[in-house]
Image (spheres, rainbow, N blue to C red):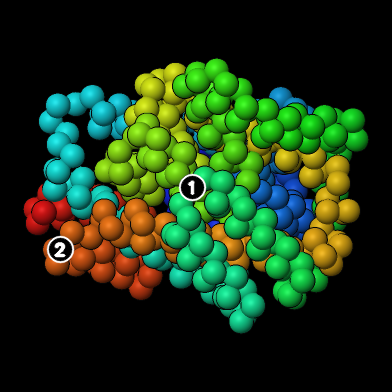
Amino acid sequence: MFTALGLTSFGGPTAHLGYFKTAFVDRRRWLDEADYANTVALCQFLPGPASSQVGMVIGFRRAGYLGVLMAWLAFTLPSAATLTAFALLVKNSAWVDPQAGWLAGLLAAAVAVVFHAVAGMAKNLAATKVTATIAVLSGITVLALPGPWTHLLVIFVAALAGMAFCSASEPTAAAHTATVPQSVAIAALTVLIVAIVALPVLARTTGNHFLEMVNAYVSSGALVFGGGHVVMPLLEQHTVAPGWVTHTEFLAGYSAAQAVPGPLFTFASFLGAADAGLLGAFIATVAIFAPSALLVLFGLHYWDRLSHPLRVRKAFSGANAAVVGLLAAALYQPVFTHGVTGIASLGIVATCWLGMAKWGVPPWAIAVGAALAGWVLL
């Protein structure tokens, strides 16, 4: 079932949740409506890719810890394998010219995709004066002070600002979809905290590139709120800034990730493969999703305590507003600055945006159409 979803779930995390509801609530009746709604609420509250985490919870409900692994693997493998193959093609094929028109078309499509994501997130997460201000200041800060730690600091400060100034929605009812022992929940959180603290030190002291990769992808996967698009600026800082991949490769992979089904976090598979081949793809994929599994195990036990305190919900309002600003900053640099090179590429951007926002064209068709338009026009 999860393999079928991994092969057919186009449209991003919101669409994935609809596919999951149809498959597991309406057809198979593994969960009822309320149970599924509470599971979704839990996973949207946690950092990481919500749709993948919902799959992990359903897998745990059906088959325990092995179910978590199998649900994640089956849903993730199709897109991870496809993007890995595309990365190896882009990296190793002599005919793939970085200035190729079809590649420029994909870069232009990325501008439209990110703009569409920013607009949608701003409408939901930065709709008030306070949250809009937090979003704008966050975007300005990361543009003025680029660096991976800037993003994390901005989110932390925004959470404090949210705690002080934001309003919060009513708490969602606790999800009693599965039980995780307290000892397992604490162990999962401990492993994650130790990894976040220790990996930067180990990577810096040893200089081992694979440890640097694990550190980059674990920190990206553990500290991202707001879904797949928001991980892009963190990954850009971790992979483009140190020279692991080029801007062109990064944006081409990001556009390709829109065209395949499954979780957008498998963009990491592309980056890992472009950087270090098949081993790099494996490391990047496991490292970016591992925090999600650990957080699910922790969250299933502590959901009631996590979701209800007013100050916690207000802090998340501030953090969510900040991620809108981070993504808006990424829209300008590197996405717009590398994706728009003239009138023709701007025309492709506008057409792609109209296709997504007004005509309901599916993401895979947007990517294919942009590549063809770039091949002809650029």
Q: Which quadrant holds the C terminus?
A: bottom left
Point out residue 168 in the picture as x, y percentages from the top left corner. Answer: 76, 72
Q: Is residue 169 visible?
A: no
Q: Are marks 1 and 2 in contact (CB under 8 Å)?
A: no
Q: Nearer the viewer, residue 281 or 263?
A: 281
Judge from the rendering whether residue 375 lies leftward or rightward of residue 49; answer left or right. Answer: left
Q: Position of residue 247 (x, y in %)?
A: 30, 44
Residue 89: x and y in percent read 25, 29
Q: Quadrant of the N terminus?
A: top right
The structure residue drawn at horizontal position 28% and vertical position 58%, both measured from the top left corner, is 337
Crowding near the residue tagged with mark 2, few <14, some 14–19, many ≥20 C-alpha atoms within 10 Å? few
Q: Is residue 127 above or below residue 111?
A: below
Please, what secondary structure does the residue beneath circle 2 have? Answer: loop
Earlier residue among tags 1 and 2? 1
Q: Nearer the viewer, residue 163 or 375?
A: 163
Q: Residue at x 46, y 70 (%)?
A: 119
Establish if 209 lies above or below 331: above
Specify whether residue 254 is in view.
yes
Residue beneath the point at 47% across and 21% down? 209
Identify which amino acid the numbered label 2 is placed on.
Answer: Gly
**Residue holding disc 1:** 147
SS of the residue at dot 1? loop
As drawn, is 253 to the left or to the right of 193? left
Residue 202, by quadrant, is top right
In the rendering, at what x and y percent does residue 163 appear?
76, 67
Please give the residue where the numbered disc 2 appears in the rendered image: 342
The residue located at (57%, 75%) in the rendering is 132
| Relative to 277, residue 186 above or below | below
Count neighbours of disc 1 (C-alpha within 10 A) and say few if under 14, some if 14 to 19, many if 20 or more.
some
